[in-house]
Amino acid sequence: MKQILSLFICTFLAIAISAQQNIVASSSMFHGNTLPDKSNNKPCQPIEGIKWKFKTGGKIFSSPAVMNGLVLVGSEDKNLYAIDLQTGKQKWKFATGGAVHSSPAVYGTNVYVGSFDGFYSININTGKQNWKFKTGGEKHIGDTSYWGMKPSGVYMDDLWDCFLSSPVVYKMDDVLTVYFGSSDGNLYAVDAENGSLLWAFKTNGIIHSSPTLYHGNIYIGSWDTYMYALDAKTGKEKWKFKTGNQTAMTGIQASATVQNGIVYFGARDAHFYALDADNGNIIWKYDAENSWIISSAIIKNETIYVGTSDTYLLLGLDVKTGKENFRFKANGYVFGSPAIAGNTVYVGDFTGDIFSIDINDRTKKIIPFSTEARKEYASTILKNDTLNFMYAAKNTDLNLYAANKKVMEDFYKLGSVVSSPVIKKNMLYAGSADGYLYALTLKVK
């Protein structure tokens, strides 16, 4: 793996994330992806079919936010869309100057979202801009001759870096603050009412993960390999924890999930970590079998669920010990975060499938929802209905950056589900690389 670059590139394709994360703002403290669930006894609800689908002009990596009768989602076509929850018709769209790879957050009558040209506050009723905050510049991670690929001396974007940091909003001492990371290496705290800078914390790498708030602290990962704990009011560092930094196995894209004083997150070093939220000491770590973890995790009934890239897995780990007690294999990379309703966990993969899995009975036959793009292109792109980089490369030289880029472009034709699904009243909402936002009905038993 480490000795042969072409094999390495095939094995360590990845990801992106985090978005990978559906970040919802509220007036109380945000506790990562731990979601309240009052339907523990609800039976498995598989996806029944499409209620509506809305076409944008670009890939959707942004995860939707559902609020005020609207579904809000960003697109690579540089727009943020507000779609009527019931009809699937456009209410408004807001044009930015760059791809909207961030997921929107809503607080009151305002929507907050990041684009490749900056960060915006938008009125949810009118779709008009309140203010814009200019960062030091948004970009993909990358380098000259990235991972030694050819041609030498040429700057190359990381082909698996899909997301921008998504915002969270928090009110402290009557000051409403929006927090978000940036490709310029800063975590920003900005006045949510007027867009003025409150403070910035500088890391030594790009930040494409999203901040998590817990008990007055912010937890944020950076491409510099560190998970940071900061005071939410002042931005002062409390502690930092270093993950691995081997070639092409470095950086944190996943966002943290915090519960009961423990910070959980995955990294590109192929491990999933549990740290003490107060001091950053490690409690346990899980070896993800040489697979990046870009998916942000969600907790249900003392089990934390998280996706992996190259092993195509949805894992369930014991929150106290890290012991694996659940494993489901998809057909491709699992970039987005899972969603849980009752006893069903929903997760999308890079082949354009969304799975509905009964967490209490994994012997049940699982029939995924497949995008129309997957149905059209699967026979020519997939091998035995599964993502296979070498097969898709068709004997091209994977030492060449252009060859890797072509394979990834072909994969996206499948309608890859990188967007994290959101559940609302027996409906599932998710975006796809085919440009569609899907509203899917769940079977009620």
Image (spheres, grey):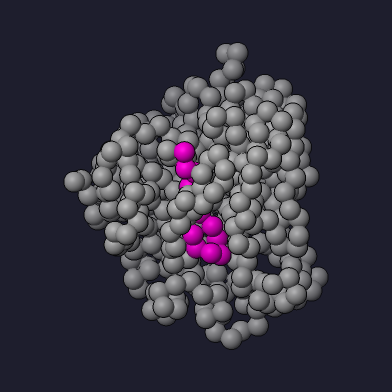
Q: Name the foreground residue: 85 vs 308.
A: 308
Q: Name the foreground residue: 182 vs 351.
A: 351
Residue reaching furthest to the bottom:
395
- Compared to residue 345, the image places residue 190 above or below, namely above
Residue reaching furthest to the left:
445
Q: So how many labels did they put on this image? A: 0
* Residue 156 seen in the current view: yes
| Residue 90 coordinates in the image, percent (x, y) | 34, 45
Could you tell whether 373 is left or right of 173 in the image? Answer: left
Check residue 303 for magenta coloring: yes
Give me the residue at 43% from left, 63% from top: 330
Residue reaching furthest to the right:
153
| Residue 122 coordinates in the image, percent (x, y) | 49, 33
Check residue 329 for magenta coloring: no
Give me the residue at 62% from left, 41% from top: 274
Give me the residue at 55% from left, 75% from top: 389
| Residue 36 coordinates in the image, percent (x, y) | 40, 32
Could you tell whether 368 is left or right of 187 in the image? Answer: left
Question: Hey, which quadrant is residue 221 in on the image?
Answer: top right
Give, as a single range, the part of the protein colored magenta.
302-313
| Residue 262 coordinates in the image, percent (x, y) | 60, 34
Question: Hey, which quadrant is residue 366 in on the image?
Answer: bottom left
* Residue 98 seen in the current view: no
Give me the residue at 69% from left, 72% from top: 1
Q: Name the foreground residue: 122 vs 149.
A: 149
